[in-house]
Amino acid sequence: MKSLTDIKDLVLKGDLKKLFSKDSKEKFHPSEIATLLNSVSLSEARGIFDSFVEERQVNVFPFLGPYLQNQLIKNAPVQQKSYILNHLSSVDRYAFLMSLKGIQRSALLVHLDDHNRKATEVMLGYSPQSVGKLLNTKFVTLRKEMTIAQAIDYLQKNQPDSDSANVLYVVDEKGELIDDIPVRRLVLNDSKKRIEDIMDHQFICLQVNDPIGEAIGKFEQYDRNVLPVVTAENQLLGIVTIDDIIDAAQQRDTREMQKFGGVESLEYPYVKTPLFSLIRKRAGWLIILFLSEMLTATAMGHFEKEIELAVVLALFVPLVISSGGNCGSQAATLIIRAMAVRELTVRDWWYVMKKELFSGLILGIILGSIGFLRIITWQYLHWYDYGAKFLLMGSTIFFSLIGIVMWGTLSGSMIPILLKRLKFDPATSSAPFVATLVDVTGLIIYFSIASIIYLK
């Protein structure tokens, strides 16, 4: 087996077609092939992909990036296009179609056979954030009246070789799920036993409209590789596998990280996203944040007289304001992640508020003490002259930091919970948003305290 370094050398030499040909002795996992195709030019990737037999094309296609998938299918002959789309798993087909615009998606649906088109149209009707989008319809069911010998014979004739075959599903005459059975029970029991003799009726399932986050939680809680998906009436619709759940979790985390950074989620990887599309994704939040930051200038203008009376106050504006923003961003990050992994819910708001207020108080005292000591030290070492009222200046910084840090932690922790309560994505309470909010309100706190302590 060649190393990835050797393969990359072959990429540069243009020998990939030979390397991936049917006669090649090298065996590559589809994901390895896809990684390399994603790294070469579009024309090279298309040439190599077209040289594969149809079965290998289907195996490699799901591992390609959305941009390359779109380009390959768009320019493929009708027969190739139809074969790939019809032989993809329902999950991979859905994921690919959802990466396209509506017109492109509709144009490709006509290439599906009746069974796949109906199944795909049903899946497209589910919420993009529900388990229905991960539904794999390639599974085989058993009846409890079968003997193990009959079940094995039936599976050999009907069950495709896949990871999902590790668990079997027993349904009644109405198609309702009764139980799930690991394949090992068929192997380790007498072939004359009936299926109902080896059932334990302790199965875990997902509802088709369950949020993906809930599905992720069940996979983690029960340590399963595959779970059945049913309707509200317990009709078995399909299965969800761990690899699809991992992909969904990665996509969700990527979207949340992008939103938390003040960026709209990207349809394609960063390196494949066109420049102007990237600018458009970033500009919206930047404009909102810029307009919000203009309120900072308004707030400083309101305290213009206080600044004129004591210009030294302006020296510490960046210090106290950034501290509040940083604490708010920390709190928002912790709460959003805790809600994402279901450590917290909206109902825990009072617990969070109490904990964050106390945390903010302690953190404010720590930072305020450092600020106070800084002013005292600089004054006594003659590094800077804060005037006769340097103790009052230090006290202003001390109490301002307590107030601003407490407000920052409170805002950062409560905004995600409030957004969740209003059915919005908590990730939209991004670090820049919280920091901007605390900047504006922090100025008001700072100068209000200064007017009481320093300017009295």
Image (cartoon, grey):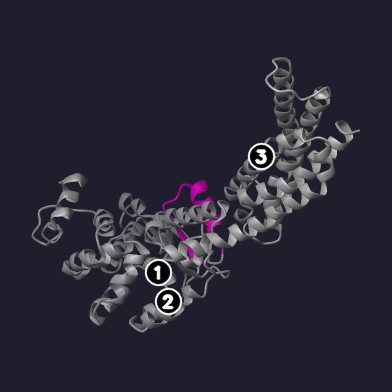
Type of residue at label 1?
Answer: Thr
| Left/right of residue 403 with respect to residue 240 in the rendered view | right
**What is the magenta range?**
210-230
The earlier-in-sequence mark between 3 and 2 is 2
> Considering the numbered disc 2 on the image, is that residue within a helix, a strand or a loop?
helix
User: How many neighbours does mark 1 have within 10 angstroms: few (below 14), some (14-19), or many (20 or more)?
Assistant: some
Magenta segment includes 218 = yes
Residue nearer the viewer, 197 or 259? 259
The earlier-in-sequence mark between 1 and 3 is 1
* Residue designated by label 1: 137
The quadrant where residue 84 appears: bottom left
> Considering the numbered disc 3 on the image, is that residue within a helix, a strand or a loop?
helix
Whether label 1 touches label 2, CB < 8 Å: yes
Q: Using the rendered image of the protein, determine whether residue 269 is visible from the camera's viewpoint.
A: yes
Residue nearer the viewer, 389 or 24? 389
* Residue designated by label 2: 119
Q: Which mark is residue 322?
A: 3
User: How many neighbours does mark 2 have within 10 angstroms: few (below 14), some (14-19), or many (20 or more)?
Assistant: some
